[in-house]
Amino acid sequence: MPEPNVLAVLRAALPCGIDLARAPRVLALRGVPGLAALLPGAALTVEQGFRPLHDAVRDDGALRVEAQEPVGGGWPDAAPVLVLVLLPRARDEGRALLARAWRDVAPDGVVLAAALNDEGARSFEKDLATLAPLAGRAAKAHGRAFWTEPRPPALGDAGAAVARWLAADAPRLDPASGCWTRPGVFNEGRLDAGSALLLEHLPADLGGRVADLGAGSGLLSVAALDRCPAIASLDLFEAEVRALDLARRNLESAAVPVRLHWHDVAGGVPAPEGGFDAVLCNPPFHVGSRGVPALGRAFIAAAAGAMARTGQLLLVANRHLPYEDALRDAFGRGEVLAERAGFKVFRAWRPRGSA
């Protein structure tokens, strides 16, 4: 969800029946920068698992910022009187956030949720209305906010819905791939067509110290280990903590050392002395629903800066994305290994900014 739209619709909804001067505890699930300014004086705890936003919120005045819910569920502090939920596109992930908000809000508190219109706002509004009566709604900037009564009585099947929605969002083992997945994570347990094409064209002798940039749940790394026995170690870099937790599960039995990094690749990648011998990459090019091709270009620059002088980058991308110039800027040599079904696989070597 683009940050300005979130803040605009929340500004239209607040204070939604809450006197924050008397009871200032606020929890924001998937919170974004700017919330502290909207809630002056609030004791604001923000949960944000996407590393760039997590770091931005941390520098924005929140009292406390966490990557994810504490083990065992719920927060150890006094129950918040206001729980903000900034909903994602994935329905099951969003429903679980609403369930957590309803479960954890104080008895006299309010759950306030917001979503973009083209990311399921009306459906999520109906979901929240199955847990408690709604007190109001606001619409602005292509978004929608809706909130419960200040003393929301539970509706008849609210407890069952909360349990069902939390269960639907839990990590699960995909029987086809044998890998762990959960809603809202790229690939949903199976290799996408682009990653599968990249895997087909990995050199059989690929080895040494290998990095996977934008690793998601680790499916490409799992498959690369199976295909390339010369890999000596793997470093996975991923900005979304939900995905990285799955990668930890999926690679826990790997026969080589595996290091997991909750990291914003667009800002550069820390490399071992001498650099990585190979970098695998299926870079993201969306932030929420917005296409951001600059992300892929940043990943290419980060790969070049983290590689050994003799290293190579193997990258797959949608054919229409303008990455050729970025590859030429970052590497002395390159080639297209394959092109199929709207994807291209690139190999590049002789990095200009190597480690």
Image (spheres, helix red, strand yellow):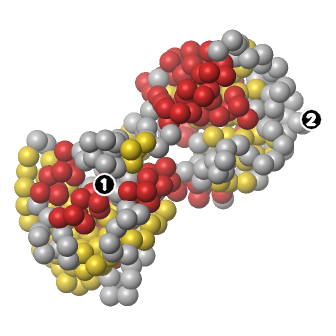
Question: In the picture shown, does residue 296 fall above or below 87?
Answer: below
Which residue bears the numbered disc 2? 22
Question: In the picture shown, does residue 266 fall above or below 350?
Answer: above
The quarter of the rendered structure image containing the C terminus is bottom left
The reply to whether residue 265 is in sight is: no
Label 2 secondary element? loop
User: Measuring 48% from the left and 55% from the top, which residue is drawn there?
Assistant: 245
Q: In the rendering, which numbered label is found on residue 219?
A: 1
Among the 4 quarters of the image, the one containing residue 338: bottom left
User: Measuring 69% from the left and 12% from the top, which residue is drawn there?
Assistant: 156
Q: Is mark 1 in CB contact (under 8 Å) with mark 2?
A: no
Among the 4 quarters of the image, the one containing residue 100: top right
User: Measuring 34% from the left and 50% from the top, which residue is drawn there?
Assistant: 179
Q: Please name the amino acid that badge 1 sits on.
A: Leu
Mark 1 or 2: in front is: 1
> Where is residue 307 shown, x and y percent of the image?
29, 78
> Where is residue 246 shown, x and y percent of the image?
43, 53
Q: Nearer the viewer, residue 209 or 85?
A: 209
User: Is 178 situated left or right of 63 in this image?
Assistant: left
Label 1 secondary element? helix
What residue occupies the far right of the structure in this picture? 22
Return the disc, 1 or 2, that comes first in the chain's sequence. Answer: 2
> Where is residue 309 shown, x and y percent of the image?
23, 84
Instruction: For label 2, count other residues whose C-alpha is less than 10 Å away and answer few (under 14), some (14-19) or many (20+).
Output: few
Separation (CA) of disc 1 from disc 2 = 49 Å
> Where is residue 51 shown, x and y percent of the image?
52, 56
Q: Please name the amino acid that badge 2 sits on.
A: Arg
Instruction: For label 1, count other residues whose C-alpha is less than 10 Å away and answer few (under 14), some (14-19) or many (20+).
Output: many
User: Measuring 69% from the left and 28% from the top, which residue is drawn there?
Assistant: 102
Question: In the picture shown, does residue 230 fall above or below 180?
Answer: below
